[in-house]
Each structure stands twice: as C-alpha cells, then as structure tokens.
Amino acid sequence: MNPQELFNTVLMASVFVLVLSTWSICVVLWFIQYVRRQRQVRKRLGIGDADTQRSQALQLWREDYTDRSETDRAEKKTLLSRLEKLRADAGWRASTPVVFLRVFGVASLAVAVMMRVGVWIGLAGAAVVITIFWMLTERRIASRVALFERQFVDSLGIAARALRAGHPLVGAFQLISEEVDDPLGSLFGEICQEQALGLDLQDSIQRVASSSDNVDLKLFATAVGIQMNSGGNLAELMDTLASVMRSRMRLHRRVRVLTAQTQMSKRILIALPFLLFIILNIIAPAYMQMFFKEWTGRYMLAATVASVLMGVWLMSRLSVLRY
C-alpha cells in the first residue's frame, strides 16, 4: 500500500468516526431531552414516585382486561356468526344457509355448463360466479353503510329538535324508529323495545353500538352514556355529533375522489386476465391446451394467478388513505 492509499484510508476512517460520533451525540442529547420532557409532564400531572406502583397496577389491570376482552371477542366470532353478520351487513333478506346454497347452486350450474369446454374452464366459471357474488356483496355493504351514515346525520337532527320540543330521550328514539327506514330505524326500534321491556336504556344503546361496526354509532353511544351519567344538554350534543359527522363525510367524499382512478385501474387490471383467458379458451381451445396438458403450462398458469392476486393486494393497499 503506497502512502497515498494509506492516507485515503485513514481519511475515510476518520470521516466515518466523526460522522458516527456526531450521530451518537445527537441521539444522546435527544434522549436526554426526551427524558426531561417526560419528567416535566409527569410532574405537571402529579404522578410521582409514590404513585408509580399504583400506575403500574392500573396499567396491568387495563392490559389484562383488554386481553380478556379480545379473547372473548375472538371466541364468540365463529364462522357461522361471521357469515350471519356479513349477510346482515349486506341486507340479504334470506337466511345465511339459503343465501350460500343459492350461490353454490349457481356456481355448480356454471361448472356443469362450461365443463364441455374443459375442466379448468368450469372451475374458472365457478370462480367468476363467486367473485361476482362477493363484489356484489361488498357493493351492497358499502351502499348500506353510506345510507346508514346519511340516515344517522338526519336522525341526530330529528332527535335534537324532539328534545328541544320537550320529548324525553326514549321519545326521540321512538320518533326516529317511526320516521326513518331501515337500516337505522330498526336499530332504534330495538332500543325502544328493550327499554319498554324494562332493560336499562344505556345498556341497550351500548349493546346496539357494540353489535355494529359503525364508528359514529359507537361515539354516539359513548357520548350519550356520559351525558346520562353526568348530565348536560343532549340536544346540543346531538347537533355537535351531526356537525362532526358531516365534516367527516365531506372528507371521505374527497378521499373517494382522489382514489377513484386507482380503484378503476384496479378493477380493469383484475378483469382483463380472466376475460382474456375465457375468450381465448372459447375461440382458440387448441392454442390453450398447453396450459392444461403440460406441466410447464400449469406452472405458468399458477404463477399468473399468484401474480394477479399479488397485484390485487398491492393495488388495494395503495388505494387506501389513512386519515
């Protein structure tokens, strides 16, 4: 090694050590500042060393309660209950076994009709039927969720006006159940029926909110429970919740506009491989026999399906905005 190379090596090592030392000093200073801020916050909140054990006990109790709640929730969600919830969210009037038996019957009919072209074509037809049913179910769920949100905003206005007119909270809920159609009217009708049977109103509201995935309904149940325990102006609470929901709905519409192009591209790119596969099997079956009779073609077909599924997952992740 000549002197110039030795000098370059020593210079590079010195620069690396200098950068590493600067970075380490910055990290240590940040950590010291972070600890100092944490102590100031704990001092302002009045959490001293005497309360440390109590705080740790409360934290452990909270974690244990959360774990037990998640375990109970996971045990209650069986396959049948999930299918029933999916059917209820989609608004299918038939029972869960009847709905899935109909889908199975249509898929079997597609297999029987398209088996004349090929076994794989029949299986592809069944997959297309199931995919169409799933897409239709998702569309119905999305439309019912949007309808529920619009009805909920209007119902909060109805409840606020009824409370200002002198009606009790149960009377406002009864008015909503009579004036608003499904899916919201039936929920408030259940609350009124349970209250008429002698159940606690707050428990009924919490039960209905826990059975639904709507965040606004859960927020409504929590706010009403706090107001019923501590007192306050329920009419003003309804107006405030309605205002918050309208703002969130406007933001959601803006997000849908921003992701509309991605959603359309995703649907087109998903549909094209399946449509081309079916069309080529119909117009040129001899050309497509390689994918069914040779192992190389089968591997290519499996790789194509895997890549399409990966593309579906990736595009679905890209089209989600967290806000």
Image (tube, rainbow, N blue to C red):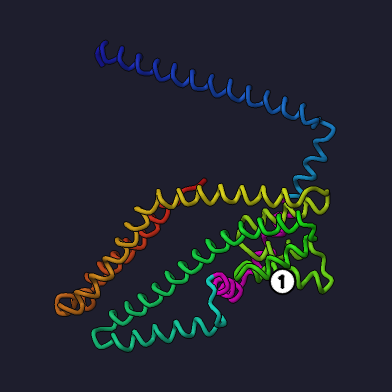
- Classify the position of the N terminus by image quarter: top left
Q: Is residue 52 above or below residue 93?
A: above
Q: Quadrant of residue 182?
A: bottom right
On the image, the x and y values in percent for residue 97 come to 54, 83
Asked whether 42 or 246 is in front, the reply is 246
Q: Main secondary structure of the magenta part?
A: helix
Asked whether 126 or 18 is in front, the reply is 126
Q: Is residue 187 left or right of residue 21?
A: right
Residue corresponding to mark 1? 190
Q: Is residue 322 above or below residue 109?
A: above
Q: How many marks?
A: 1
| Identity of the residue drawn at 20% across and 77% down | 281
On the image, the x and y values in percent for residue 151 come to 59, 62
Asked whether 219 or 288 is in front, the reply is 219
- Magenta span of residues: 63-89
On the image, the x and y values in percent for residue 116 come to 25, 88
